[in-house]
Image (cartoon, helix red, strand yellow):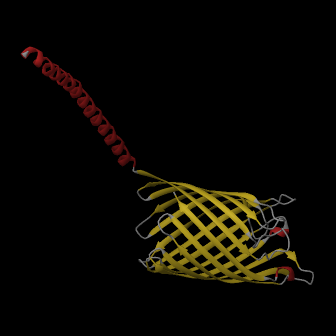
């Protein structure tokens, strides 16, 4: 009887020893694999530390709704109109100490309420290189290719733009930016005409605190073309002020003046067409986490020596965007 009762105990002991014998090598193998992975990770980290490059991918999805009175009597220009837009913007930034390189592509689907205007896909691919010279000064160079863009001189054009800017902060509050670029355009008109010209701009920013800014901006750009209808000279001046209401909520007000001169568009009564535009603008922005909600309203006063374009009207825009 004693031997009969001891057999189950002996079997249980044998099974336990067998299990232990199987478990010990497994734990040892797992530990060895863990050590190998840690060693490999250390090599990768060491390699990254040597190269110094950091990679930051980004993806933004934006939806816009625009309600505006069209001030253009024909499809030759698109100034304003009711429209819907969806924008997908992936980007990739490589950073190494004082150097950063960013590639960004914006794909837009634009649909007009006016059936006489053609709905379209737009695309803008931009490569930017930024070098920090010091804690207060940086320089930036960029190249951009845009397709089917809306231009003041024509409703659809493909464009190349190359340029750069310098940014300098005198202190935590005062910052200035100066930039210039060269643009070439090919218009989707019957003549398949082209245009080219320079753009120069500047900006002064005063920082009162977090999300609390005042801006002054100025720009001059021109387009010269063998097709006189595409010639354009433009001056733009803006002043804006942004005030925080809550940590994620801010209100921005802006005043803008723009002068458009069309040297290739003579008037029946003599002279050349010139448009002066002035608009006050108010924008409410709420940006909780990766979300951004914006509501913008402006009233555009357009004075032109061509009666067809001497019109004014409201423009409203709602925007929702999310960063993934």
Q: In this view, does 149 lie above or below 283?
A: above
Q: Camera-side residue: 6 or 20? A: 6
Among the 4 quarters of the image, the one containing residue 81: bottom right
Q: Residue 124, how many percent across, how many down?
A: 65, 58
> Is 277 placed left or right of 126 in the picture?
right
> Is 74 placed left or right of 246 in the picture?
right
Among the 4 quarters of the image, the one containing residue 272: bottom right
Among the 4 quarters of the image, the one containing residue 179: bottom right
Q: Camera-side residue: 19 or 208? A: 19
Q: Is residue 98 above or below residue 175?
A: above
Q: Camera-side residue: 78 or 262? A: 78
Q: Residue 21, how many percent across, how many down?
A: 20, 23
* Picture mark count: 0
Q: Is residue 212 visible?
A: yes
Q: Is residue 206 visible?
A: no
Q: Residue 71, how many percent across, how many down?
A: 79, 77
Q: Which residue lies at the image location 33% right of the left edge and 37% below the top edge? A: 40
Q: Residue 3, how many percent across, how many down?
A: 9, 14
């Amino acid at each position: 009887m004693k031997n009969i009762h001891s057999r189950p105990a002996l079997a249980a002991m044998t099974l336990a020893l067998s299990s232990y014998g199987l478990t010990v090598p497994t734990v040892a193998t797992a530990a060895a694999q863990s050590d190998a992975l840690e060693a490999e990770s250390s090599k990768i980290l060491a390699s990254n530390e040597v190269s110094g490059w950091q990679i930051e991918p980004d993806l933004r999805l934006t939806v816009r709704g625009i309600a505006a009175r069209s001030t253009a009597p024909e499809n030759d220009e698109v100034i304003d109109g009711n429209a819907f837009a969806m924008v997908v913007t992936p980007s990739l930034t490589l950073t190494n100490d004082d150097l950063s390189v960013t590639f960004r592509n914006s794909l837009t689907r634009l649909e007009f309420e006016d059936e006489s205007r053609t709905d379209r896909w737009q695309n803008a691919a931009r490569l930017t290189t930024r070098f920090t010279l010091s804690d207060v000064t940086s320089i930036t160079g960029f190249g951009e290719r845009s397709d089917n863009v809306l231009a003041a001189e024509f409703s659809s054009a493909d464009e190349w733009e190359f340029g750069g800017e310098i940014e300098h902060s005198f202190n935590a509050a005062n910052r200035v930016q100066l930039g210039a670029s060269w643009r070439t355009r090919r218009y989707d008109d019957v003549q398949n005409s082209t245009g080219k010209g320079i753009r120069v701009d500047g900006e002064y920013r005063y920082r009162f605190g977090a999300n609390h800014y005042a801006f002054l901006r100025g720009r001059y750009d021109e387009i010269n073309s063998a097709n006189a209808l595409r010639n354009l000279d433009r001056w733009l001046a803006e002043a804006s002020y942004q005030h925080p209401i809550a940590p994620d909520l801010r209100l921005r007000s802006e005043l803008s003046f723009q002068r458009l001169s069309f040297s290739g568009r003579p008037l029946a009564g003599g002279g050349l067409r010139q448009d002066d535009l002035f608009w006050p603008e108010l924008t409410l922005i709420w940006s909780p986490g990766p979300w951004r909600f914006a509501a913008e309203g402006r009233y555009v006063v357009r004075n032109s020596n061509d009666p067809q374009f001497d019109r004014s009207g409201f423009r409203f825009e709602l925007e929702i965007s999310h960063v993934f």
